[in-house]
């Protein structure tokens, strides 16, 4: 089968399409025939060596939407099931940017009804990151919440999920994105130097600049595992490391089906054009997700 891999670190040009054996599912695993797979900033991080793995062949891709085509012993899925899943792990030999991918059965959820695979593929990594970050923050109605990077994929989901919890969020976003973030549930847009928030979900990786906007004794959660700023002023500082939780993903699927969550696709590329897709991601300004189609 064909799969996107990197064997040396660098820019978009180092990503290559390799011919490799089709993976076989083990116990409590399923193999998914990939219909679509989102490209995320973490893939660029793998490509550039942020997560290590020098000298290894590293697969690309965390998100997948497709059809179960083989089932390992003890996996409660059937061949033909249309599913979405998170294929967790930065340093792995094969990812979801491939024709087939094997994932743990517990990472899988039924695909949202009435949604095409390209849009469905934008859900797992970013929505799970957003909801698990909110779980760490534990904002309650009446508290003020700031979401940085609110126009991005994680930030957009965080706005909608916070509103569902009765916590209308303030968005930190460019002026040109104000209409977008309001459509995603932002109650208002923060001013340039506004602070004093009870909680900040830092989806833009601003670090200390985002921490400065938290009131004394408030809470900060970043979305790069282990890379949060040093705590100060009694602020609780944490970072989220997303987990592949199929049950939680199924809850998010239901929110897509009832219209609570908005799936946003920026552009699609053929798998063979993965270098072009990485180059587009590197340009920045992407609203929604870039999606690869085998």
Image (cartoon, rainbow, N blue to C red):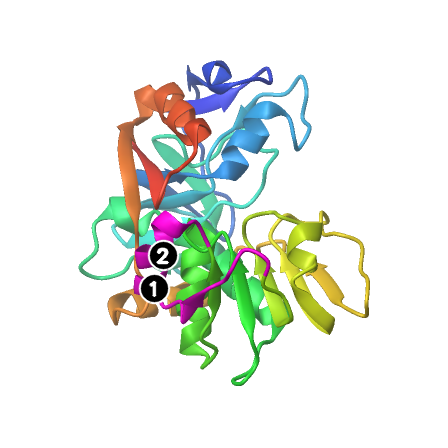
- Residue 16 located left or right of residue 294: right
Q: Residue at x 50, y 15 (%)?
A: 14
Give x and y (percent) for residue 127. 44, 58
Which residue, given by chain and number where applicable, does mark 1 sit on? Answer: 182
Q: Nearer the viewer, residue 21 or 198?
A: 198
Q: Residue 45 is drawn in which quadrant?
A: top right
> Residue 212, relative to residue 280: is it above or below?
below
Give yes or no for contact between labels 1 and 2 (Cβ–Cβ under 8 Å): yes
- Characterize the local packing of mark 2: few (<14), some (14-19) or many (20 or more) Cα atoms within 10 angstroms: some
Q: Residue at x 67, y 66 (%)?
A: 214
Query: Which of the labelled discs sits on residue 149, or is there none?
Result: none
> Residue 166, relative to residue 224: is it above or below?
below
Whole-angstrom CA distance, mark 1 to mark 2, is 6 Å
- Residue 161 located left or right of residue 118: right
- Residue 265 located left or right of residue 171: left
> Residue 136, relative to residue 291: is it above or below?
below
Q: In the rendered view of the protein, which quadrant contains the C terminus?
A: top left
Farthest bottom residue?
Answer: 142
- Characterize the local packing of mark 1: few (<14), some (14-19) or many (20 or more) Cα atoms within 10 angstroms: some
Which residue, given by chain and number where applicable, does mark 2 sit on? Answer: 178
Start and end of the magenta stretch? Answer: 173-193
Q: Nearer the viewer, residue 69 or 265?
A: 265
Residue 14 colored in magenta in the image: no
């Amino acid at each position: 089968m064909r799969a996107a891999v990197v064997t040396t670190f660098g820019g978009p040009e180092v990503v290559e399409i390799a011919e490799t054996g089709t993976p076989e599912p083990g116990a409590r695993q399923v193999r998914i025939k990939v219909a679509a797979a989102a490209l995320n900033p973490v893939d660029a991080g793998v490509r550039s060596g942020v997560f290590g793995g020098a000298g290894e062949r590293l697969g690309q891709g965390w998100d997948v939407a497709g059809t179960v085509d083989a089932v390992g012993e003890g996996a409660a899925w059937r061949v033909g099931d249309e599913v979405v899943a998170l294929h967790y792990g930065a340093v792995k030999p094969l990812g979801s940017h491939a024709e087939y991918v094997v994932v743990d059965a517990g990472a899988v959820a039924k695909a949202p009804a009435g949604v095409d695979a390209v849009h469905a593929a934008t859900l797992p990594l970013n929505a799970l990151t957003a909801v698990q970050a909110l779980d760490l923050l534990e904002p309650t109605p009446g508290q003020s919440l700031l979401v940085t990077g609110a126009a991005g994929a994680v930030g957009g989901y965080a706005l909608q999920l916070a509103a569902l919890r009765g916590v209308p969020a303030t968005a930190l976003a460019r002026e040109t994105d104000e209409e977008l973030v309001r459509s995603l549930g932002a109650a208002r847009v923060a001013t340039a130097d506004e602070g004093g928030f009870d909680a900040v979900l830092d989806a833009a990786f601003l670090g200390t600049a985002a921490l400065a906007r938290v009131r004394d004794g408030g809470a900060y959660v970043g979305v790069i595992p282990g890379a949060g700023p040093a705590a100060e002023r009694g602020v609780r500082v944490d970072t989220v490391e997303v987990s592949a939780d199929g049950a939680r993903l199924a809850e998010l699927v239901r929110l897509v089906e009832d219209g609570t969550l908005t799936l946003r696709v920026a552009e699609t590329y053929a798998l063979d054009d993965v270098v072009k897709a990485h180059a587009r991601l590197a340009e920045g300004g992407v609203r929604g997700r870039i999606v690869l189609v085998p």
